[in-house]
Amino acid sequence: MRSDILKEKILNGEYTDIFADLYGKNAEESQKKRYIKAIEQFEDIYGLDKDISIYSAPGRTEICGNHTDHNCGLIVAAAISEDTICVAAKNDENMVKIASEGYDAMQPVNLEKLRATVSDEGTTRGLVKGICAGVIKWGGEFKGLDLYITSEVLQGSGLSSSAAFENAVAAAVNSEYNNGRFTPVELALIGQYAENEYYAKPCGVMDQTTSAVGGTICLDLEDVSNPKVEQLPLDLDSFNLVLYTVDSRASHDDLTEEYASMPKEMKDIAQIFWKDSLRRLDLPTYINHISFLRDMVGDRAVLRGMHFYMECKRVEDLCRAVKNSDKELFLKKITESGHSSYEYLQNAYVSAEVKNQPMAVALSVAQSFLQDIGGAWRLQGGGFAGAVQCFVPEEKADEFEKYMEIVLGEGCCKKIKLRRQGAVKVI
């Protein structure tokens, strides 16, 4: 649809119901402005009155299953209303041109030169290049695109801005040139391929799958090349709960080694038994060899292994709680997950940083408020920095925000709404 016509339709309210479905009631007007601004930015960069489409991919929040994905484990995660949108139009230049709000325009990706290079590592352009290569690797077709991208998923928030970005771009490619041939799970695998091979981040596929599929899902990664996805009927309104992320105000800088140590130590254990992941090693065998493993890999690795087994069991219990609308069990398993990450996985803070433990402080303050009023709290995402996840009784929400702001500062709390749609063509 031509950009000028699309702006007029948005202003006339033709997409109000779609915006309400994606972002919740009372968000329609703000999203109208956001989408029109994105179209106008696209026009400023690429020209007026092009035929455009707009794609949306949500961020995600992990609910249980902290750092189980890299060892073929189980996870519960949910798509959220904060998203990345991508305004897209075909071009005939065999180039992907990318512009993002708040950033200088990137060097175009030449679709005839998609080999991964060291200069791609850690760059947004590398992600786009990897998605292009992944589409072709998975048997798709791809020609030129003009892209303008804007996001409400904040970087470093633990809500996976990178997966939302990847899926928004991949959804555009899937629709514009491949007639929607790729399933959501295939789009997720393409995004993971881009991160692993081009961005040089050894991530699992949990973030991408949750964003691509949407809703609340139980993800079984026993076969990482073909993840099993089960939709769960999680309804926080029926539980009278509000979901928050609480920003610990901790920096992610220089934590690559800390993040990498968790999958490495778990896999070191598995490889002692000639397995590629802890999922292939049964718990009784693990328990029977703990004394031996302590000498081989050390106590921290052993504790992280215990976290993996207990966390996968918690995921199963939490799925049962959601299906049975068992609020008490749901909250119990959320909190157990948080304690296990803190005590066994040990990713609440960097052990050498005695004076700087903001995640641990955020967790302790959340616990002091929530433990006796029917709430739950846990570390969210990678750990060491970022955000704490809290489930707060609705009637206590305002009081909770003020309480947390006393310690962590104004604006540290963000309400999160869950979303049933994954990566979609909005318009």
Image (tube, helix red, strand yellow):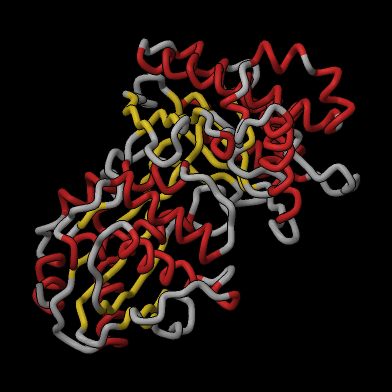
* Residue 79, position as x, y percentages in the image: 38, 41
Q: Residue at x 42, y 59 (%)?
A: 152
* Residue 277, position as x, y percentages in the image: 61, 33
Residue sitting nearer the eye, 106 or 309:
309
Q: Is residue 263 above or below residue 74?
A: below
Quadrant assignment, res 164: bottom left
Q: Is residue 283 left or right of residue 142?
A: right
Q: From this viewpoint, which residue is outermost toward the front?
A: 274
Q: Residue at x 25, y 84 (%)?
A: 43
Q: Quadrant of the N terminus?
A: bottom left
Quadrant assignment, res 362: top right
Residue sitting nearer the eye, 345 or 236:
345
Quadrant assignment, res 233: top left
Q: Is residue 111 above or below residue 347?
A: below
Q: Is residue 399 visible?
A: no
Q: Quadrant of the C terminus?
A: bottom left
Q: Is residue 293 left or right of residue 393?
A: right
Q: Is residue 246 above or below residue 400?
A: below
Q: Is residue 109 visible?
A: yes
* Residue 156, position as x, y percentages in the image: 59, 56
* Residue 334, position as x, y percentages in the image: 56, 23
How many marks the image carries: the answer is 0
Residue sitting nearer the eye, 151 or 424:
424
Q: Is residue 142 above or below residue 300?
A: below
Q: Residue at x 74, y 31 (%)?
A: 272
